[in-house]
Image: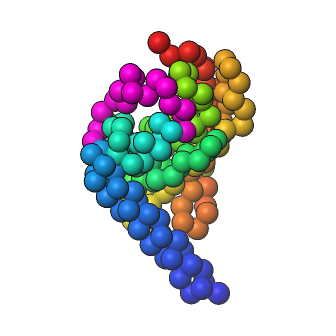
Amino acid sequence: MEAHMTAAVQTVTEQWEEQLRTVRARVLQGGGRPGVVPAQEARGMTGLAIMQALLEGRFPYAPIAETLDFFLVEVDKGAATFQGTPLPTHLNPMGTVHGGWYATLLDSAVGCAVQTMLEPGFGYTTAELSVNLVRGARLDGGPLRAIGTVLHCGRQLATAEGKIVDAQGRLYAHATTTCLVFEAR
């Protein structure tokens, strides 16, 4: 039974890594680089279209993704998924993965999930983020995924939840957010 479980986890890990390689290659081929989405170009686009443009490399991805070594791998209406693997540069002085690494991945996942719900001409900002760490990540533990899902998106407020899981589906952290939705200028 355990050998079957290990093989299944290895298969999921390989699928995740292949998807990440494919997305990174597509982004680089599309001209992707770290930066800020050009407001003038994005103004007439839905939030989902903006997020899809990020996945295609037509818009720059967030510079923090390079700093913390994580990357957007999937978007859909009301959902966003990022993948990252903790590195030695993400450790706190006690030798464990810094809580800010988890929080940043989760903030990215839940915020981008909200972004996918916005109509043209609207933006959002995080007003509240609550993160709970439930398992410590190991440097040799493989990739982790932060999955954000919108719970509600109105004209002024949006709420979303997120979780960080490994290839076995084990939970490492979870979060909720409240975002302010506003007309972009």
- Residue 155 place in picture, x, y as percent: 68, 20
Question: Can residue 94 be seen in this snapshot?
Answer: no
Question: Can residue 28 be seen in this snapshot?
Answer: yes
- Residue 43 place in picture, x, y as percent: 46, 23
The reply, left or right, for residue 12 in relation to residue 20 is: right
Residue that extends furthest to the top in the rendered view of this protein: 185
Kindly identify the residue that appears in the image at 62 percent across and 43 percent down.
77
Kindly identify the residue that appears in the image at 47 percent across and 12 percent down.
185
| In magenta stretch: residue 7 | no
Q: Nearer the viewer, residue 71 or 50?
A: 50
Magenta part mainly helix, strand or loop? loop
Residue 27, placed above or below residue 16: above
Q: Nearer the viewer, residue 83 or 55?
A: 55
Dividing the picture into quadrants, the one containing residue 131 is top right
Kindly identify the residue that appears in the image at 28 percent across and 53 percent down.
29
- Residue 98 place in picture, x, y as percent: 42, 43
Q: Quadrant of the N terminus?
A: bottom right
Q: Nearer the viewer, residue 123 or 82?
A: 123
Dividing the picture into quadrants, the one containing residue 182 is top right
The reply, left or right, for residue 110 in relation to residue 157 is: left
Q: Which region shows up in magenta?
A: 33-48
- Residue 7 place in picture, x, y as percent: 53, 82
The reply, left or right, for residue 173 in relation to residue 151 is: left
Kindly identify the residue that appears in the image at 60 percent across and 27 percent down.
119
